[in-house]
Image (tube, rainbow, N blue to C red):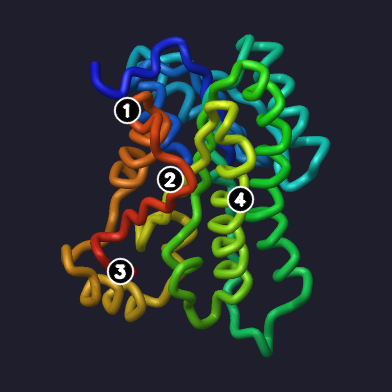
Amino acid sequence: MKFDLSGKVAVVTGSSRGIGAGIAQMLAAQGAKVVVNHRNSPEGAEEVVSAIKVAGGEAIIIQADVSQSSEAQRLIKETIDTCGQIDILVNNAGTTRDTLIMTMKDEDWELVLRTNLTSTYYCSKAAVRPMMKKRSGRIINITSVVGLAGQAGQTNYAASKAGIVGFTKSLAKEIGSRNITVNAVAPGFVPTALTEVLPPEMIQAAIANTPLGRLGTVEDVANAVLFLASNEAAFITGQVLTVDGGLVMQ
Protein backbone atom coordinates (compact mmCIF):
# COMPACT_ATOMS: atom_id res chain seq x y z
CA MET A 1 0.00 0.00 0.00
CA LYS A 2 1.49 3.31 -1.03
CA PHE A 3 1.79 5.89 1.77
CA ASP A 4 1.58 3.06 4.30
CA LEU A 5 1.62 4.47 7.86
CA SER A 6 1.26 1.17 9.67
CA GLY A 7 2.96 1.26 13.06
CA LYS A 8 3.03 5.06 13.17
CA VAL A 9 1.41 7.26 15.80
CA ALA A 10 0.03 10.60 14.63
CA VAL A 11 -1.22 13.56 16.65
CA VAL A 12 -3.57 15.96 14.84
CA THR A 13 -4.39 19.10 16.81
CA GLY A 14 -7.83 20.62 16.44
CA SER A 15 -9.14 17.48 14.75
CA SER A 16 -12.71 17.31 16.04
CA ARG A 17 -14.07 18.91 12.85
CA GLY A 18 -13.26 20.32 9.43
CA ILE A 19 -9.85 19.88 7.88
CA GLY A 20 -8.38 18.41 11.05
CA ALA A 21 -11.04 15.70 11.19
CA GLY A 22 -10.40 14.86 7.54
CA ILE A 23 -6.66 14.62 8.14
CA ALA A 24 -7.15 12.35 11.16
CA GLN A 25 -9.38 10.01 9.18
CA MET A 26 -7.03 9.97 6.21
CA LEU A 27 -3.97 9.08 8.31
CA ALA A 28 -5.92 6.40 10.17
CA ALA A 29 -7.12 4.91 6.87
CA GLN A 30 -3.48 4.37 5.92
CA GLY A 31 -2.65 2.54 9.13
CA ALA A 32 -1.60 5.21 11.63
CA LYS A 33 -2.91 5.21 15.18
CA VAL A 34 -4.31 8.71 15.50
CA VAL A 35 -4.67 10.98 18.50
CA VAL A 36 -7.70 13.19 17.94
CA ASN A 37 -7.19 16.41 19.85
CA HIS A 38 -9.77 19.02 20.75
CA ARG A 39 -10.07 21.96 23.12
CA ASN A 40 -13.80 21.97 23.90
CA SER A 41 -15.56 19.81 21.28
CA PRO A 42 -15.92 16.36 22.89
CA GLU A 43 -18.92 15.39 20.75
CA GLY A 44 -17.10 16.19 17.53
CA ALA A 45 -14.02 14.30 18.66
CA GLU A 46 -16.15 11.26 19.53
CA GLU A 47 -17.71 11.36 16.06
CA VAL A 48 -14.29 11.43 14.40
CA VAL A 49 -12.99 8.54 16.48
CA SER A 50 -16.15 6.56 15.84
CA ALA A 51 -15.82 7.07 12.08
CA ILE A 52 -12.19 5.95 12.22
CA LYS A 53 -13.04 2.81 14.17
CA VAL A 54 -15.98 1.93 11.91
CA ALA A 55 -13.55 2.10 8.98
CA GLY A 56 -11.21 -0.31 10.77
CA GLY A 57 -8.71 2.22 12.09
CA GLU A 58 -7.34 3.07 15.54
CA ALA A 59 -7.82 6.37 17.34
CA ILE A 60 -8.00 7.87 20.80
CA ILE A 61 -9.06 11.28 22.12
CA ILE A 62 -6.85 13.59 24.17
CA GLN A 63 -8.39 16.90 25.19
CA ALA A 64 -5.91 19.76 25.46
CA ASP A 65 -5.86 23.50 24.82
CA VAL A 66 -2.68 23.60 22.75
CA SER A 67 -2.52 27.39 22.91
CA GLN A 68 -1.22 26.84 26.46
CA SER A 69 2.33 25.53 26.91
CA SER A 70 1.55 23.11 29.74
CA GLU A 71 -1.42 21.69 27.83
CA ALA A 72 0.61 21.13 24.67
CA GLN A 73 3.27 19.35 26.69
CA ARG A 74 0.61 17.20 28.33
CA LEU A 75 -0.83 16.26 24.93
CA ILE A 76 2.50 14.91 23.72
CA LYS A 77 3.29 13.22 27.04
CA GLU A 78 -0.09 11.48 27.18
CA THR A 79 0.36 10.38 23.57
CA ILE A 80 3.68 8.74 24.37
CA ASP A 81 2.44 7.28 27.66
CA THR A 82 -0.61 5.78 25.93
CA CYS A 83 0.72 4.90 22.48
CA GLY A 84 4.43 4.46 23.21
CA GLN A 85 5.70 6.97 20.66
CA ILE A 86 4.96 9.91 18.40
CA ASP A 87 5.94 9.76 14.74
CA ILE A 88 3.76 12.41 13.08
CA LEU A 89 2.59 15.77 14.40
CA VAL A 90 0.05 17.78 12.41
CA ASN A 91 -0.33 21.30 13.79
CA ASN A 92 -3.83 22.10 12.57
CA ALA A 93 -5.51 23.93 15.48
CA GLY A 94 -6.73 27.32 14.34
CA THR A 95 -9.33 30.04 14.60
CA THR A 96 -10.32 33.36 13.04
CA ARG A 97 -11.55 36.72 14.30
CA ASP A 98 -11.96 38.68 11.07
CA THR A 99 -12.34 42.43 10.98
CA LEU A 100 -10.55 45.49 9.61
CA ILE A 101 -7.58 46.59 11.66
CA MET A 102 -9.27 49.84 12.74
CA THR A 103 -11.97 47.85 14.53
CA MET A 104 -9.86 44.89 15.65
CA LYS A 105 -9.69 44.33 19.38
CA ASP A 106 -6.34 43.55 20.92
CA GLU A 107 -7.73 40.36 22.41
CA ASP A 108 -8.80 39.17 18.93
CA TRP A 109 -5.28 39.72 17.62
CA GLU A 110 -3.78 37.88 20.57
CA LEU A 111 -6.29 35.00 20.43
CA VAL A 112 -5.67 34.26 16.75
CA LEU A 113 -1.87 34.47 17.08
CA ARG A 114 -1.87 32.25 20.17
CA THR A 115 -4.27 29.67 18.74
CA ASN A 116 -2.72 29.43 15.29
CA LEU A 117 0.97 30.23 15.66
CA THR A 118 1.95 29.87 19.30
CA SER A 119 0.26 26.46 19.51
CA THR A 120 2.41 25.31 16.59
CA TYR A 121 5.51 26.34 18.53
CA TYR A 122 4.35 24.71 21.77
CA CYS A 123 3.40 21.37 20.21
CA SER A 124 6.46 21.20 17.97
CA LYS A 125 8.78 21.97 20.88
CA ALA A 126 7.17 19.21 22.93
CA ALA A 127 7.36 16.68 20.09
CA VAL A 128 10.89 17.42 18.89
CA ARG A 129 12.71 15.82 21.83
CA PRO A 130 11.11 12.34 21.52
CA MET A 131 11.45 12.52 17.74
CA MET A 132 15.16 13.38 18.06
CA LYS A 133 15.66 10.39 20.34
CA LYS A 134 14.10 8.16 17.67
CA ARG A 135 16.00 10.01 14.94
CA SER A 136 12.84 10.18 12.86
CA GLY A 137 9.65 12.16 12.64
CA ARG A 138 7.29 14.23 10.54
CA ILE A 139 5.97 17.65 11.53
CA ILE A 140 3.34 19.11 9.21
CA ASN A 141 1.98 22.59 9.85
CA ILE A 142 -1.28 23.83 8.38
CA THR A 143 -0.83 27.37 7.11
CA SER A 144 -3.02 29.13 4.49
CA VAL A 145 -2.84 30.94 1.17
CA VAL A 146 -3.84 33.99 3.22
CA GLY A 147 -0.44 33.74 4.89
CA LEU A 148 1.19 33.88 1.45
CA ALA A 149 -0.90 36.53 -0.28
CA GLY A 150 -2.73 38.41 2.49
CA GLN A 151 -6.42 39.22 2.75
CA ALA A 152 -8.18 42.40 3.77
CA GLY A 153 -9.93 42.00 7.11
CA GLN A 154 -7.61 39.19 8.19
CA THR A 155 -4.41 40.86 9.35
CA ASN A 156 -4.33 38.73 12.50
CA TYR A 157 -5.01 35.48 10.63
CA ALA A 158 -2.57 36.33 7.84
CA ALA A 159 0.16 37.21 10.34
CA SER A 160 -0.33 33.93 12.19
CA LYS A 161 -0.25 31.86 9.02
CA ALA A 162 2.73 33.72 7.55
CA GLY A 163 4.51 33.11 10.84
CA ILE A 164 3.92 29.39 10.44
CA VAL A 165 5.73 29.50 7.09
CA GLY A 166 8.83 31.07 8.62
CA PHE A 167 8.64 28.75 11.61
CA THR A 168 8.44 25.71 9.31
CA LYS A 169 11.50 26.64 7.28
CA SER A 170 13.57 27.52 10.35
CA LEU A 171 12.68 24.37 12.27
CA ALA A 172 13.40 22.24 9.20
CA LYS A 173 16.96 23.59 9.21
CA GLU A 174 17.37 23.00 12.95
CA ILE A 175 16.37 19.33 13.09
CA GLY A 176 16.92 17.96 9.60
CA SER A 177 20.16 16.26 10.71
CA ARG A 178 18.05 14.07 13.02
CA ASN A 179 15.99 12.75 10.09
CA ILE A 180 12.95 14.84 11.05
CA THR A 181 11.16 16.64 8.25
CA VAL A 182 9.14 19.80 8.76
CA ASN A 183 6.75 20.98 6.06
CA ALA A 184 3.61 23.05 5.70
CA VAL A 185 0.40 22.72 3.73
CA ALA A 186 -1.34 25.91 2.60
CA PRO A 187 -4.99 25.28 1.74
CA GLY A 188 -6.96 27.65 -0.43
CA PHE A 189 -10.68 28.14 0.08
CA VAL A 190 -12.16 24.96 1.57
CA PRO A 191 -15.75 24.87 2.89
CA THR A 192 -15.46 24.45 6.67
CA ALA A 193 -16.87 26.10 9.78
CA LEU A 194 -14.10 28.71 9.56
CA THR A 195 -14.94 29.71 5.98
CA GLU A 196 -18.73 29.52 6.10
CA VAL A 197 -18.84 32.96 7.73
CA LEU A 198 -17.14 34.58 4.73
CA PRO A 199 -19.31 36.75 2.45
CA PRO A 200 -20.68 34.83 -0.57
CA GLU A 201 -19.14 37.36 -2.93
CA MET A 202 -15.68 36.57 -1.52
CA ILE A 203 -16.22 32.87 -2.16
CA GLN A 204 -17.42 33.50 -5.70
CA ALA A 205 -14.44 35.74 -6.37
CA ALA A 206 -12.11 33.01 -5.12
CA ILE A 207 -13.70 30.46 -7.46
CA ALA A 208 -13.48 32.89 -10.38
CA ASN A 209 -9.77 33.45 -9.70
CA THR A 210 -8.97 29.76 -9.27
CA PRO A 211 -7.65 28.15 -12.46
CA LEU A 212 -9.30 24.83 -11.57
CA GLY A 213 -12.60 26.66 -11.14
CA ARG A 214 -13.78 25.18 -7.85
CA LEU A 215 -13.34 25.28 -4.10
CA GLY A 216 -11.05 22.78 -2.46
CA THR A 217 -12.20 19.85 -0.37
CA VAL A 218 -11.07 18.52 2.96
CA GLU A 219 -9.84 15.42 1.13
CA ASP A 220 -7.63 17.56 -1.13
CA VAL A 221 -5.81 18.91 1.92
CA ALA A 222 -5.74 15.59 3.77
CA ASN A 223 -4.12 13.88 0.76
CA ALA A 224 -1.31 16.45 0.79
CA VAL A 225 -0.73 15.89 4.50
CA LEU A 226 -0.73 12.12 3.98
CA PHE A 227 1.98 12.42 1.34
CA LEU A 228 4.19 14.60 3.53
CA ALA A 229 3.71 12.19 6.45
CA SER A 230 4.75 9.19 4.38
CA ASN A 231 8.10 7.56 3.64
CA GLU A 232 7.66 8.68 0.04
CA ALA A 233 8.29 12.27 1.19
CA ALA A 234 11.45 11.41 3.16
CA PHE A 235 13.65 13.85 1.18
CA ILE A 236 11.25 16.79 1.34
CA THR A 237 11.61 19.34 4.13
CA GLY A 238 11.17 23.07 4.68
CA GLN A 239 8.56 23.27 1.94
CA VAL A 240 5.11 24.83 1.66
CA LEU A 241 2.74 22.70 -0.41
CA THR A 242 -0.02 24.98 -1.66
CA VAL A 243 -3.33 23.15 -2.14
CA ASP A 244 -5.46 25.86 -3.71
CA GLY A 245 -6.30 24.92 -7.30
CA GLY A 246 -3.80 27.50 -8.53
CA LEU A 247 -5.36 30.48 -6.72
CA VAL A 248 -2.00 31.73 -5.44
CA MET A 249 0.93 31.13 -7.75
CA GLN A 250 4.47 32.16 -6.83
Kind of element beneath mark 2: helix
Residue type pointed to by label 1: Glu
Characterize the local packing of mark 4: few (<14), some (14-19) or many (20 or more) Cα atoms within 10 angstroms. few
Q: Earlier in the sequence, mark 2 or mark 3?
A: 2
Query: What's the residue at 33%, 18% (across, down)?
Result: 4
Q: CA distance from mark 2 to mark 3?
A: 22 Å
Residue type pointed to by label 3: Met
State the residue position of label 3. 249
Q: CA distance from mark 1 to mark 4?
A: 22 Å
Q: Earlier in the sequence, mark 2 or mark 4?
A: 2
Q: Earlier in the sequence, mark 1 or mark 4?
A: 4
| Residue 137 horizontal/vertical position (percent) | 54, 26
Q: Is residue 93 left or right of residue 245?
A: right
Q: Are marks 1 and 3 in contact (CB under 8 Å)?
A: no
Number of the front mark, 3 or 4: 4
Q: Residue furthest bottom?
A: 102
> Looking at the image, can residue 137 be seen?
yes
Query: What's the residue at 29%, 68% (across, down)?
Result: 247
State the residue position of label 4. 170
